[in-house]
């Protein structure tokens, strides 16, 4: 009798279980939809605030940089300073709030540099582009080696930090930038090199570049194409004249990208010894090589024609 009784309960139990499952599914779906609506509402509000830039708008954005949702924090970070397709001071799309240079916004952005979300950190570094405060230097140094990227692994967050440090030209950033230059990450190294180049008027930077020269010359003699490229680009950026014989020889390298890079570097460090190689390079089958060689020859001819 007990077995029969239990068997009679099976359909009821199954129906109850299915009912609970459906209720939970509907409830979760409703909650998810509701959360998406709330998130979108916040993002829309932020978009309005970034244009109005009044006291009320500032307070709203300051509230949302602490939101639990990373998309909301990301958009609030962008609203606090700048968004841009091209990461440079000339093309920065500065928001109305960013133009105010509000200290509260700057302090909020600096805190966001430690956010657990790469998306938020990325947006934060973008926004910091429009601020020019010395209190940014040490926080940017801390994320200089951040190799994460929410969108494209070829553009890590640390490279943007290096760019801004180059714009700020603070002596405290020299050693960290040199250390970043010595690391393997090509993109961060490239931006660290550009930052140091912008600081060439500082004698400390010039001393560090002298110390880096043996490393650069070694790279130019390496069998690795990536290493050679780094050496060529840095030779031009840092105006390493000792690298000239190696760069001249790389005009005949089998890899087109290396020939193109060599021709470009010779714009900055070439002399009369570069003319024969560049004259051949203007006939190269690859357009980028021809264009760079033509450019370099034009610059060299002007230099050599001067008394």
Image (cartoon, rainbow, N blue to C red):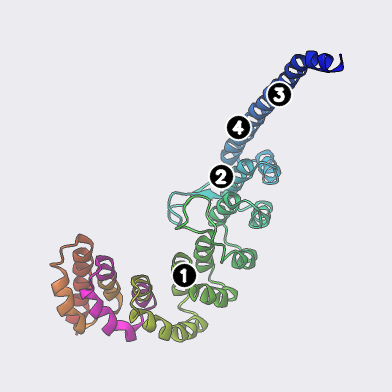
Provide the residue designation for mark 3.
21
- What is the span of residues highlighted in magenta in the rendered image? 232-261
Q: Which of marks 3 and 2 is nearer the N terminus?
A: 3
**Residue 17, percent from left and from top:** 74, 21
Helix, strand or loop under label 3: helix
Provide the residue designation for mark 2.
96
Q: Answer with the quarter of the image where residue 154 lies.
A: bottom left
Camera-side residue of 209 and 13: 13
Q: Does the magenta stretch include residue 39?
A: no
The local crowd at label 3, few if under 14, some if 14 to 19, many if 20 or more residues have their Cα within 10 Å, is few
Front of the two marks 3 and 2:
3
Would you say the residues marked 4 and 1 are in contact, meaning their CB atoms lie under 8 Å apart? no
Q: Is residue 306 visible in this depiction of the protein?
A: no
Q: Is residue 40 left or right of residue 288?
A: right
Distance of label 1 from label 2 (alpha carbons): 33 Å
Q: Where is 93 relative to 197, above or below?
A: above
């Amino acid at each position: 009798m007990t077995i029969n009784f239990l068997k009679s309960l099976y359909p009821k139990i199954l129906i109850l279980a299915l009912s609970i499952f459906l209720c939970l599914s509907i409830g979760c779906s409703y909650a998810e939809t509701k959360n998406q609506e709330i998130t979108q509402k916040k993002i829309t509000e932020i978009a309005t605030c970034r244009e109005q830039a009044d006291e009320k708008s500032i307070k709203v954005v300051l509230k949302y940089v602490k939101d639990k949702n990373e998309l909301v924090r990301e958009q609030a970070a962008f609203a606090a300073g700048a968004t841009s397709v091209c990461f440079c001071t000339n093309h920065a799309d500065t928001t109305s709030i960013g133009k105010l240079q509000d200290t509260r916004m700057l302090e909020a952005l600096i805190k966001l540099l430690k956010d657990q979300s790469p998306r938020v950190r990325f947006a934060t570094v973008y926004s910091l582009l429009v601020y020019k405060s010395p209190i940014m230097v040490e926080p940017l140094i801390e994320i200089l080696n951040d190799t994460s990227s929410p969108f494209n692994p070829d553009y890590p967050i640390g490279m943007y930090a290096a760019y801004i440090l180059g714009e700020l030209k603070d002596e405290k950033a020299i050693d960290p930038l040199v250390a970043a230059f010595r690391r393997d990450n090509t993109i961060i190294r490239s931006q660290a090199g550009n930052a140091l180049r912008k600081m060439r008027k500082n004698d400390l930077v010039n001393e560090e570049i002298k110390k880096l020269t043996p490393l650069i010359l070694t790279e130019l003699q390496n069998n690795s194409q990536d290493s050679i490229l780094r050496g060529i680009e840095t030779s031009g950026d840092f105006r390493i004249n000792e690298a000239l014989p190696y760069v001249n020889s790389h005009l005949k390298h089998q890899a087109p990208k290396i020939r193109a890079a060599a021709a470009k570097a010779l714009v900055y460090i070439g002399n009369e010894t570069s003319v024969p190689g560049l004259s051949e390079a203007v006939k190269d089958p690859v357009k980028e090589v021809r264009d760079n060689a033509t450019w370099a020859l034009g610059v060299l001819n002007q230099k050599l024609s001067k008394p």
